[in-house]
Amino acid sequence: MYAVWHTIIEGFVAGLTLSLMFGPAFFTLIQTSLERGFRPAFRLAFGIFLSDSLLVAISFLGASRLFSDPAASKIIGVVGGIILVLIGIYTFRKKVQLQKVMENHGEEIRMPSHWKYFFKGFFTNMANPATWIFWFVSVGTISAKYTTEAGEVVHFRVILFFLMTLGTVFAMDTLKSFVAHRIKKFINARTVGIVNKVVGVLLVLFGIYLLVSSFVPLSLDEVTGKLMFQ
């Protein structure tokens, strides 16, 4: 029983740490909450959560071997970099449309294509090769940690650890969305416009960095240490 609680605590601490890291997904989440409101931001956070969950599941199937192939690793880096650059340019150039609240009914105006934020969160997270590498390395490391002396992986503890980690990250992302939405009344169109431009520039710079790093050898420590974003 002690081992189970120990695993739960470790997963929670890991998730809390990840949720405090600043990256493309974080900036996109805050920007969406400020401009569109809590519900679209929640969908975006759910998209990020599912993409992380998918990567963890894929890692159990041994897909991390992809990164042992230089050609495959380079292709993933280039494609991911291009996607982030395009998203960044779109974010930088798009017009500010602060979401309004209906005064009479106290409910948010329905925005078109709400599920686009789910896919935006999913693909923004998936476009970051460092996210892939991080989860692949994490699954390998945690699996090794929860291996018996007989060499057998205790799958229950591994699964429990990542359930806690992913659940904590999702809960924190939801909280970020809620807080950003709550302070929205103190934010005007000019402020949101500035946020959009900052987020756009950061995404473009990060995308360019991924493109460049795809052709410049980096050690695993450098990648996980400098490129790991939530």
Image (spheres, grey):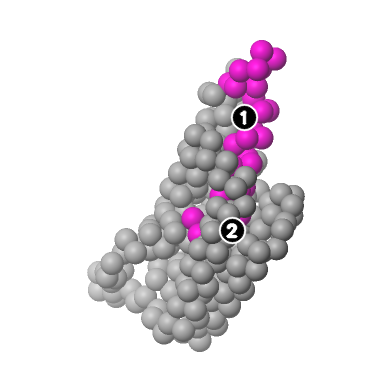
Q: At x 43% / y 82%, what residue is drawn?
A: 94
Residue 72 to residue 155: above or below: below
Q: What amino acid is at disc 2? A: Lys
Q: Nearer the viewer, residue 218 or 70?
A: 70
Residue 148 is inside the magenta segment: yes
Query: Dots 2 and 1: beta carbons under 8 Å?
Result: no
Residue 54 to residue 60: above or below: below
Q: Nearer the viewer, residue 216 or 200?
A: 216
CA neighbours of label 1 inside 10 A, class few (<14), some (14 to 19), many (20+): some
Q: At x 49% / y 79%, what residue is drawn?
A: 89
Residue 203 is inside the magenta segment: no
CA neighbours of label 2 inside 10 A, class few (<14), some (14 to 19), many (20+): some
Choose top left, top right, bottom left or bottom right for residue 27.
Answer: bottom right
Position in image of residue 217 (x %, y %): 72, 58
Q: Secondary structure at mark 1?
A: helix
Q: Nearer the viewer, residue 3 or 125?
A: 125
In this view, the mark in front (2 or 1):
2
Residue span colored magenta: 126-154
Q: What amino acid is at disc 1? A: Ser
Q: Secondary structure at mark 2?
A: helix
Q: Nearer the viewer, residue 213 or 152?
A: 213
